């Protein structure tokens, strides 16, 4: 049976909301969760994408070790660039080469066809050599999975982030609920911290489901 995160258990059983000025991931601690990790050639590589133009486009590179620890190796965060620019950078920075990438997860919105271009972001990426996969999920589901990795009900962590991922580390500490938010309200979409977190959410949701269900692949 899967354990709930400690924060999830407290929210359900004790009606306790995250503290620290409404920070979503109040148990994230850089002293615990940030380490100088590098690519391990013995592990599969995953990528996870959140799309944006004015707001940033985000790519995270992730591996999962034999103990189930999610290792976030690197990040790419850039605004106001075209998909071909992003694709070239993603392929250049992928340490294993495309043939060793187990999956590239992404925002389901990327599958929507643009009325002007007549295509979608995921189809553009495919023509550029990056095949993506996604499944639809609620924001709260992904947040709970991230919390569970930060600190499960038995106090263990299965998430470590490379110190080179400064934008993600900042987002983990600053992603927050609106002021005077009510129970069940979604975190604030501020255009700054939500995008790295969204990319991380897509990884956890898709990775969890990929061994159980067939997700859409483009």
Image (cartoon, rainbow, N blue to C red):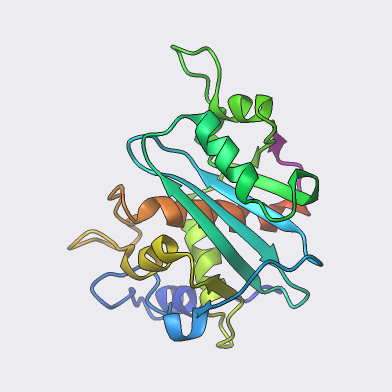
Q: Position of residue 28 (x, y in %)?
A: 43, 77
Q: Quadrant of residue 211?
A: bottom right
Judge whether residue 216 is colored magenta. yes
Q: Name the spot of residue 9 as percent of width and height, x first.
A: 48, 77
Q: Is residue 187 magenta?
A: no
Residue drawn at (38%, 44%), measured in percent from left and top? 56
Q: Is residue 186 visible?
A: yes
Q: Is residue 103 above or below residue 44?
A: above
Residue 22 percent location from the top left of the image: 27, 70
Residue drawn 34% across and 78% down? 16
Find residue 121 and report its horizontal and vertical position in percent: 54, 28
Q: Nearer the viewer, residue 158 or 137?
A: 158
x 74%, y 54%: residue:
96
Q: Is residue 141 or residue 196 the one in the foreground?
A: 196
Residue 201 higher or lower than 129, as above or below? below
Q: Residue furthest left?
A: 180
Q: Nearer the viewer, residue 189 or 123?
A: 123
Q: Identify the residue shown where x is 43% and y is 62%.
A: 168
Q: What span is in magenta?
A: 213-217
| Residue 131 drawn above or below residue 74 | above
The answer to whether any part of residue 4 appears in the image is no
């Amino acid at each position: 049976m899967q354990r709930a995160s400690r924060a999830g258990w407290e929210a359900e059983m004790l009606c306790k909301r995250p503290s620290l000025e409404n920070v979503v991931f109040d148990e994230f601690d850089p002293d615990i969760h940030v380490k100088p990790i590098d690519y391990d050639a013995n592990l599969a590589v995953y990528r996870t994408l959140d799309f944006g133009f004015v707001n940033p486009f985000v790519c995270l590179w992730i591996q999962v070790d034999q103990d189930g620890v999610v290792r976030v190796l690197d990040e790419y965060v850039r605004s106001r660039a075209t998909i071909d620019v992003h694709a070239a950078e993603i392929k250049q920075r992928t340490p294993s080469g495309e043939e060793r990438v187990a999956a590239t997860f992404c925002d389901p919105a990327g599958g929507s066809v643009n009325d002007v271009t007549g295509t979608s972001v995921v189809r553009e990426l495919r023509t550029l050599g990056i095949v993506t996969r996604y499944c639809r999920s609620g924001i709260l589901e992904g947040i709970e999975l991230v919390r569970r990795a930060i600190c499960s009900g038995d106090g263990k962590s299965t998430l470590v982030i490379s110190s080179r991922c400064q934008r993600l580390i900042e987002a983990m500490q600053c992603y927050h609920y609106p002021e005077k938010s009510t129970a069940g309200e979604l975190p604030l979409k501020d255009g700054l911290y939500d995008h790295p977190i969204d990319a991380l959410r897509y990884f956890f949701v898709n990775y969890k489901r990929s061994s159980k269900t067939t997700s859409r692949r483009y």
